Image: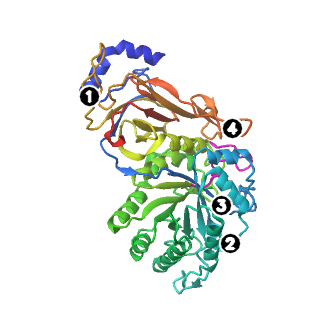
Amino acid sequence: MAAGWLLKAVGFFFWAVFWLGGAATVSTDAGAVGVGQAAVVVDGRSAIAATDEDFVCATLDWWPPDKCDYGACSWGLASLLNLDLSNKILLNAVKAFSPLKLRLGGSLQDSLIYDTDGTSSMRFFQKSGAKIVFGLNALNGRVPMPDGSLGGPWNYTNAASFIHYTVSKGYDIHGWELGNELSGSGVGARVGADQYAADVIALKQIVDSSYQGRASKPLVISPGGFFDAAWFTKLISKTKPRQMDVITHHIYNLGPGVDTHLVEKILDPSYLDGEAGTFSNLQGILKSSGRSTVAWVGEAGGAYNSGHHLVTDAFVFSFWYLDQLGMSSKFDTKSYCRQTLIGGNYGLLNTSTFEPNPDYYSALLWHRLMGTKVLSTTFNGTNKIRAYAHCARDSRGITLLLINLSGNDTNHVSVTSEGAHPHGKKKNSRRFGHIPGLGEEAELTREEYHLTPKDGNLQSQHVLLNGNVLTPLANGDIPKLEPVQVKGTQPITVYPYSIVFAHIPSFYAPACR
């Protein structure tokens, strides 16, 4: 109510300032300590990048219950080997995305021999509507090389047999990914880029042969490892166009899960910015190659060795996770796979109860609100606010994501457009004229989704949406994610340690038509 009262009080003066200066801020606590004035400028003229429709992706791993890190065993019965696929929350959590891309793989996949007893798993994936990316063992047939790497051609006999089996059963596989963390210096083992390229070509031939005569074929994906510029460049150069559809890399930029400074890193804008170089470099390599190969983040858990309980499975991690989604999409990353859907201390779902952790709801909101077209976004104000904008998903206008890393400051954020040429004539009003970038319907409402931690505790595993705790219903259904309606003439209020998705249907953005 206070914001509405102030808006009436400043009346025409506020909008005159907005019109002349391009942006302005209304503050309900003008002059008070901890209140920031800021503006977001969104360039809606053209998209700077594009994601896949199913940009949000999650992983399922092979780790057994006795996988322990730093004295803690966090995997329980959350492995592909023993996961309770009859759990209603699990099924509904996947179905809510319609679809959710699931990458099946991880550190143990290069030690696996595949059999054909996967009927129950495939029934679950089909019922949930998930898109499946299956990780293949890339170390079969390797021999030690003088430089410490593993060489020799990939023995694909078992993998080919398994692929043929899935085709014979009519199982829908979205993609086949070769290997896990064997690129560059590798993790535990490494394979040279020249040999890896030859193996990718072999996989492509197997896929083409297995799916011959079919309308569509699964994607050929590799290498599922950490980014190494020279290694990735050679891999791409040694494969011909259309032989490798997707190049995947992994992200654990926060360091080991045992690190006691994880929260500090997550709340540090400079630290978060550090990963932009990886996205930019990979984008540059792909552009210069002339190939149609696209980039995915194939696995990202933030902190390696299973994460850190009450950090990577708590509200505070949504700052890192959503910032990663926003940052990676700006560099034309087509999909981003979170480690994990369930398992370890970084799951979207609780390993024991299957109840969604805060990041699950963050991911679901992104999926439902952020469209595929990425817009250039500039935040003029504190560096503690992270801002990203996309064309709205299946709707008019744009969706703006604002992340407040400050625990002290409330920011009232105005929104305007860079270089906007609004349609139609200026709309006359007793109080204000037409506002550049907001369209002729600026006085209409927008939808806002405010995420905050329960009890103000960043390390809470419960999240509030517009002040209400999100929890599954008694029947296992995922709760509805309802927005609050806000007048389009009011600034967006971003509270301390909070996240806001704002759908602005009246924003004028030619790129979103």
| Residue 53, above or below 436 | below
Q: Quick one: label 4, few (<14), some, or many (20+) residues within 10 Å? A: some
Alpha carbons under labels 1 and 4: distance apart: 46 Å
Magenta region: 338-357
| Residue 100, above or below 202 | above
Asked whether disc 2 touches disc 3, contact meaning CB atoms under 8 Å apart, the reply is no
Q: Amino acid at mark 4?
A: Pro
Alpha carbons under labels 4 and 3: distance apart: 24 Å
Name the disc covering residue 424, or none: 1
Residue at numbered disc 2 = 114
Q: Amino acid at mark 3?
A: Asp
User: Is residue 341 part of the magenta span, yes or no?
Assistant: yes
Q: Quick one: label 3, few (<14), some, or many (20+) residues within 10 Å? A: many
Task: Judge depth for marks 1 and 2 and give the one in front.
Answer: 1
* Residue 342 shown left or right of residue 221 in the figure: right
Name the disc covering residue 472, or none: 4
Dot 3 falls on a residue whose secondary structure is loop
Asked whether disc 1 touches disc 2, contact meaning CB atoms under 8 Å apart, the reply is no
Q: Amino acid at mark 2?
A: Tyr
Asked whether disc 4 touches disc 2, contact meaning CB atoms under 8 Å apart, the reply is no
Dot 4 falls on a residue whose secondary structure is loop
